[in-house]
Amino acid sequence: RQSATPDLLDGLNHPQAEAVCLPLDTHGAILAGAGTGKTRVLVHRVAWLVQQGVQPSRILAVTFTNKASKEMRERVTSLIGDEAAKALRLGTFHSIGLRILRRYGAVIGLHNAARLAPMDQDESVALLRRVMKEKQCDLTIEKPKDHYQLLQSWKDQGLTPEKVPPQNNASDELTRHLYARYESEKQRSQAVDFGDLILMPNIIFAARPDIAEKVQRGLSQVLVDEFQDTNAEQNRFIGFVTGNGGAVKTFVVGDDDQSIYGWRGAEASIMQRFIDRYQPNHLVRLEENYRGNPVVLEAANAVIANNKARIGKNLWTRRVDAHPVSLRMYGDGDDEADAVAEEIADRLEHKVPAQEIAVLYRKNMLSRGLERALVQLGVPYRVYGGLTFYQRKEIKDALAYLRLVANPHDDGAFRRAVGTPRRGVGDKKLSQLTEQCRRNGSSLWTEASLEGKGKLPTFLEDVTRLAAVYRKEGLGAVTRAAVVKTGLLDFYIETAKERGEECAENLNELVRAVDVFHHRFRTGQTAVASVAAQPGDVLSEFLTEAVLESDAGGKNTNRSDVVSLMTVHKAKGLEFGYVFVIGLEDGEFPKLSSNGRGNIEEERRLFYVALTRSKHALYLSYAANRQRFGMRDDEDALEEDGEPLFGRSRFVSEIPQHLLLDPLQVEGNVSERLPAHSAARRLAPPTCGRSDDIW
Ligand code: ATP
Ligand code: MG
């Protein structure tokens, strides 16, 4: 084992330290449960590699979220200092893929690759909807979003339109036809969607081995966190950048019990396949959990033990500060939201920092009631995912102008901008232009610039002027101009009535967010910038961040002292002192379709992820009667008279009774007394054969 200065290995247990110091010329893998320090090992290994003399720019670390890469950079910086940490390549698959497209996109016909910013889901679905209209699909039956999702899942498997086999089912067959058309429309607009960010780099690498080799020569170590959730295309991507287990050494960490993206094509067996393919000389196992209290850990172990498809491992902890899991039933969703909000307010009064509190749920939908209750009590919070700042209509309208500045051929942005504020360019005119585009394979911008008179030339001039403002005065100025000079602000103040003020405030917030962003950009701290040594164009960086990390800016940007609300999927890899898991009704969590089907094992892994986020206390709750009106996928599960079909989640019943605090209590004070048992003793490390049964 090579030497390391002691401080880097401080605070690591023996197997963790061993993993951090694996020789430079080996592939490595850690397969271990939640909270055992996998991410910590990854961070320390990056620092250790730099200390061993590996050039920071030759290290690529892939995390699951942008938040995680930011945290990783911070933690590495504190270990090895700012100078060295700055040059590291850290990012998500998406941000790294985008980097590659910006650099090499011309190879596949992306003319303006350097300034590429992906479309977000709404824009992509809108594009698909236009294609469907053109094909005269009945949009009351065929939902664009469903087709979009299937199409994206094909992309996750590396299936370009010509590779998708004919489908048996009529609706899927329709998707197949739409897919080809959607792609050509996208190409015409010089746009890319989420799936393209991985698929297209792979296409480039496959077509141009010299480019793949160049990337490989530039790298020496690739590290991947949350490896269990990578899908086939992401794996191919790793294969390309590492030379398939060749010269670039690969180090992955993951937990099969936390594989929760099967619906996006991830396979729990991916870990095993990595081992088969890369033959890592070192597989490290970690079983000591440093996160949860012993009761929560025992509960999580008991629940996940019900899954058949798992490698099997048991976590233990030396902690003895057992706190029972609180379980509550409420009359309905509103009662639950009120009670949880009150409990949170109470924690805050007892000086628990807000950022140590999280509320997790299975479906985005459930955040609404909670938001209402938190607002009433004046509790600051942030919703991750859901309708975020950058998805608000007025913000998207302003961004449409910026997108046009970055890429005038972006038809989606053109449509949006030309329509708000109203400029008297009617639907008829637009359909006529669209028809011309189709005939000539051109963009709306190109066709519009051929118009001699009417409203269009004025619009084009406005946008051209914005582009000049951007060139001469920069991002802040062009954003201000897009909000004010285009008449957008006035338009909202005049037409949005009671929302007018809020819209105006949001638009102002956008201008502020841009300034904050600009500062981060200059210091190399933006999501995509951090993947590359060379910062890109500031406007496309900003547009990208608005899409890839839509909760990174806007309101509350500078506040970290807020309670977090998010889906369990979003919470993966994170930890909080106090975790509330709400909406634990059978059918909701596990999520089942109306005929009672679902992927129970994956749902259980998701529940396991939820339980294992908690460091100190865990609160579970469900409603006896949840109103499900307005939720399309569950409507038919509602009986005529609105009686609930679902009782409490089966997963709750899988937690041993003695770990729960007053399981039958409906409401009342939560006391933090210990139940009469010692979970700590039961969770002591096994005395013989520790971890030998893991494989
Ligand atoms: P997950 O599977 O949820 O992603 P993980 O295996 O990545 O979890 P980490 O997030 O790295 O686990 O670590 C969990 C917590 O335990 C963190 O707060 C971390 O700082 C702490 N921790 C990890 N290892 C040690 C250790 N040797 N000593 C003290 N604390 C540790
Ligand atoms: Mg982790």
Image: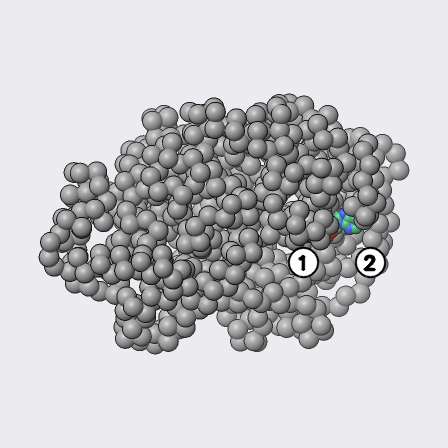
Question: Do labels 2 and 1 touch, CB within 8 Å?
Answer: no
Query: For the residues marked 2 and 1, what is the alpha-carbon distance in whole angstroms?
Result: 16 Å
Identify the image's colour scheme: rainbow, by chain, secondary structure or one colour.
one colour
> Which mark identifies residue 576?
1
Residue 206 horizontal/vertical position (percent): 45, 25
Q: Residues within 10 Å of mark 1 (few under 14, many from 20)?
A: many
The residue shown at (64%, 64%) is 355
Mark 2 vs mark 1: which is more N-terminal?
A: 2
Looking at the picture, which amino acid does disc 2 mark?
Answer: Asp
Residue placed under numbered mark 2 in the picture: 321
In this rendering, the answer to whether 643 lies above or below 590 is: below
Circle 2 — which element? loop
> Which mark identifies residue 376?
none
Of all residues, the one furthest to the front in this rendering is 472
State the image quarter where residue 503 is shown. bottom left
* Quadrant, the C terminus: top right
